[in-house]
Amino acid sequence: MVIATGDDGFMWEPRHLAALDAVARTGTFGRAAVELGYTQSSLSQQIAALERAVGGRLFDRLPGARPPQLTPLGRLVLEEGRSLLARQGSATDAVDRYLAGGGRVDVGTFQTVTNALLPDVVRRVREEHPDARILLSEDETDSPTLDGLDLLFFDGDGPAGAQRAEVFRDEHVLLTPVGLLADGPVHLAELHGRPMVALPSLCDQAMVEHALAAAAVVPDIVFRTADNQGVTAMVRAGLGVAVMPLLAVAGQRDDPGLSFHALLPALPERRVDVWWRGSLSPLAARFRDISLEGGVELTRRGRSGG
């Protein structure tokens, strides 16, 4: 690696600057050579190359056994050289940390992924890379973008030209106040005209309403909210029923005020993907891979009720 170039075309190389530093610290060319693993002749050649590069002597060689003394130019080059070597070391450390999975990852998410998937993913990533900086941003939109993001979790069509991998699939269930309907599956026809609490009509919710309409089922939407807990709270209060992705409400399965019902026929499953564009940093790639592993386990637990 070249750090700087002298006026006559010679290079300020790290090994030359390291040789200068070693002689200045140890006080002799012999001790510096031993420290760096050179012969004394080779070390002298390193210093001579640096002197050619800077255009002047760096040491006064004194007679007898007296240690060489830095010239004023030598002191200047040593000061600048140590600064350059420190910056090189810092850059090398930063690259090493990056290649080992350090650095920063920016992730776009939404409620279900935030609540059901990412806690375990973040924990695992932080266990592997304690110094990693993880930045999450949550949005509910039907026009997702990867601008400023390494990874994006989304349950619909993602940004044009981006790559994707499936994280999990999620079945839809009917939530009702306890006792409203008999236990067991509910036919879609029973939802026609029924008061319903719903998410905003975008992404997966738009697909749900399209599938209901295709089955000639038009519920009476009495409340829309982007808050999954707001949906379940209003269902529990008796405002209406709700069709929700299972993993969005899986934490409410033990709620004594709610009943969960399968739908007949089943609605299309929600598919959640992770999206990215181009090459990923090692940290972002590891975050993605752990998320894919977590998605498999999340689906297993959600469908088994565990």
Image (spheres, rainbow, N blue to C red):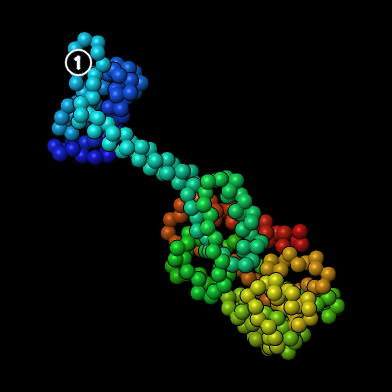
Q: Can residue 90 be seen by looking at this rendering?
A: yes
Residue 38, can we see it?
no
Say which element carries label 1: loop
Q: Against 291, is 69 above or below? A: above
On screen, residue 97 versus residue 119, left or right, reads left
Left/right placement of residue 243 relative to residue 1 reads right
Mark 1 surroundings: few (<14), some (14-19) or many (≥20) residues within 10 A: few
Quadrant of the snapshot with the C terminus: bottom right
**Between 250 and 188, the one nearer to me in the picture:** 250
The image quadrant of residue 204 is bottom right
Q: Which image quadrant for residue 83?
A: top left
Q: Picture coordinates of residue 296 (x, y %)?
A: 65, 57
Q: In this view of the protein, which residue sits in the foreground, 186 or 274?
A: 274
Q: Residue at x 53, y 54 (%)?
A: 134
Relative horizontal placement of residue 92, taking residue 210 as reference (left or right): left
Observer-nearest of 65 and 192:
65
Where's residue 64, x and y in %? 21, 10
Q: Amino acid at mark 1?
A: Leu
Query: How many numbered marks appear?
Result: 1
Q: Which percent across, then down, holds residue 263?
A: 74, 76
Percent x, y of residue 5: 20, 39
Q: Residue at x 60, y 53 (%)?
A: 122
Query: Which residue position holds label 1?
Result: 62
Q: Residue at x 30, y 19 (%)?
A: 27
For the N terminus, which image quadrant?
A: top left
- Outermost residue, front direction? 72
Taking the image as shown, residue 100 lies to the left or right of residue 69, namely right
